[in-house]
Image: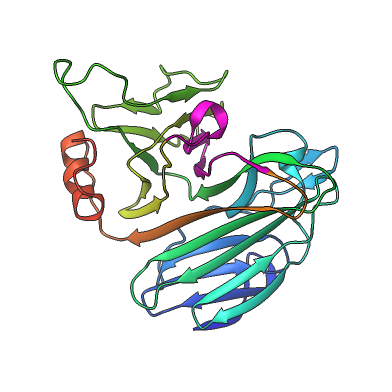
């Protein structure tokens, strides 16, 4: 159920598969998940081996796929290169643990445990950040997944309530300085927020939300990727209270989840877990009603 393979120019990847789905993990760089697909199907994750971002502490490469960062974002701290081999161990025939070298510039250690369900497409990704430095730091583990371009991110609204039933706000929505809510890639519906990629529009767009529904999704060519994560009521989240963010520029799309902020003294760790699933032949149609019907078997009626 786990074998070695060459993928994206990396000769020592590990492939976890169960006959329904497969996950490919890099060990020469990372920790990274570089492929997630139904058996023999198209990769729902992006592949970006040739992109490089120069930083004061080295060249950072997005590579594509899924990575672990520490929020809030900062340059160059967030962009510490992860281009070196990682330690890895097989937990069982469906699960691997990957541990990156401590980042020299930050003292941060990153660990990722990836488990594919024995049946179906479900994947559990456990993230762990440890402070190997000499003083306390404040951060939040942050799971960022770069999606294969050409699709649409779906974030559920909180359940609709008429004015006469509910007077208090439903949640926070956070904007960046470059966020333009008139951009045609956005759709703000009663039940869902949508963000599309557009290869002709390279200026970035991003929002964050306090997502109490516990899921967000990405749809592309009939494939539906669902990412599940918790919301802790009363916890302090980064970025003015975001536990769910999405970002696009051109064909680049990220679907992100964040843990609460944590203060880590030397040797202490913080963890964050995501649960993934992937479905094919999902037709979301062109209306919010058709989208709700398509999502209902997987996430219920959401904000409807």
Residue 78 image offset from top left, x and y in percent = 71, 41
**Residue 209 vertical placement versus 109 (above, below):** above
Q: In the image, what residue occupies the spot 65% across and 77% down?
A: 89
Which x, y percent locates residue 86?
73, 67
| Residue bounds of the magenta highlight | 234-263
The image quarter in which residue 142 lies: top right
Q: Is residue 206 left or right of residue 68?
A: left
* 40 is higher (above) or lower (below) than 125: below
**Which of the 4 image quadrants contains residue 65?**
bottom right
Q: How is the image coloured?
A: rainbow
| Residue 53, image quadrant | top right
The answer to whether residue 177 is left or right of residue 77 is: left
Q: Is residue 246 magenta?
A: yes
Q: Closer to the camera, 66 or 44?
A: 66
Numbered marks: total: 0
Q: What's the residue at 41%, 25% (across, down)?
A: 172
Regarding residue 45, the answer to whether it shows in the image is: no
Could you say where residue 112 lies in the image, as x and y percent from the top left?
Answer: 61, 62
Foreground pick, 89 / 268: 268
Q: Is 31 positioned to the left or the right of 285 in the image?
A: right
- Residue at 19 percent across and 55 percent down: it is 297
Which quarter shows the C terminus? top left
Q: What residue do we see at 56% from left, 26% from top?
A: 203
- Provide residue 127's location: percent of width, then percent of height: 58, 57
Q: Is residue 166 magenta?
A: no
Nearest the eye: 145 or 220: 145
- Residue 90 seen in the current view: yes
- Drawn side of residue 138 relative to residue 215, left or right: right
Q: Is residue 71 above or below residue 171?
A: below
């Amino acid at each position: 159920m786990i074998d070695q393979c060459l993928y994206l120019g990396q000769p020592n990847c590990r492939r976890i598969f169960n006959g329904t789905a497969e996950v490919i993990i890099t060990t020469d760089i990372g920790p990274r998940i570089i492929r997630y697909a139904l058996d023999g199907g198209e990769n729902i994750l992006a592949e970006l081996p040739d992109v490089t971002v120069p930083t004061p502490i080295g060249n950072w490469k997005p590579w594509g796929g899924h990575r672990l960062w520490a929020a809030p974002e900062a340059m160059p701290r967030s962009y510490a290169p992860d281009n070196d081999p990682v330690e890895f161990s097989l937990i069982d025939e469906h699960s691997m643990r990957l541990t990156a070298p401590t980042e020299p510039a930050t003292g941060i250690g990153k660990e990722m445990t990836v488990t594919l369900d024995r049946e179906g497409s479900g994947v559990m990704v456990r993230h762990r950040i440890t402070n190997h430095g000499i003083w306390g730091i404040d951060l939040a583990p942050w799971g960022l997944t770069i999606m294969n371009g050409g699709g649409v991110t779906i974030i559920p609204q909180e359940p609709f309530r008429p004015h006469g039933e509910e007077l208090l706000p439903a949640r926070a929505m956070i904007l960046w300085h470059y966020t333009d809510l008139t951009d045609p890639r956005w759709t703000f519906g009663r039940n869902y927020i949508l963000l599309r990629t557009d290869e002709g529009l390279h200026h970035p767009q991003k929002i964050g939300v306090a997502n109490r529904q516990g899921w967000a999704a990405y749809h592309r060519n009939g494939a539906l990727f669902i990412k599940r994560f918790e919301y802790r009521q009363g916890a302090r989240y980064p970025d003015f209270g975001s536990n769910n963010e999405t970002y696009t520029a051109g064909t680049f799309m990220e679907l992100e989840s964040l843990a609460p902020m944590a203060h880590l003294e030397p040797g202490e760790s913080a963890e964050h877990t995501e649960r993934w699933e992937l479905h094919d032949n999902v037709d979301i149609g062109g209306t919010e009603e058709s989208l709700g019907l398509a999502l209902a078997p997987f996430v219920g009626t959401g904000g409807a």
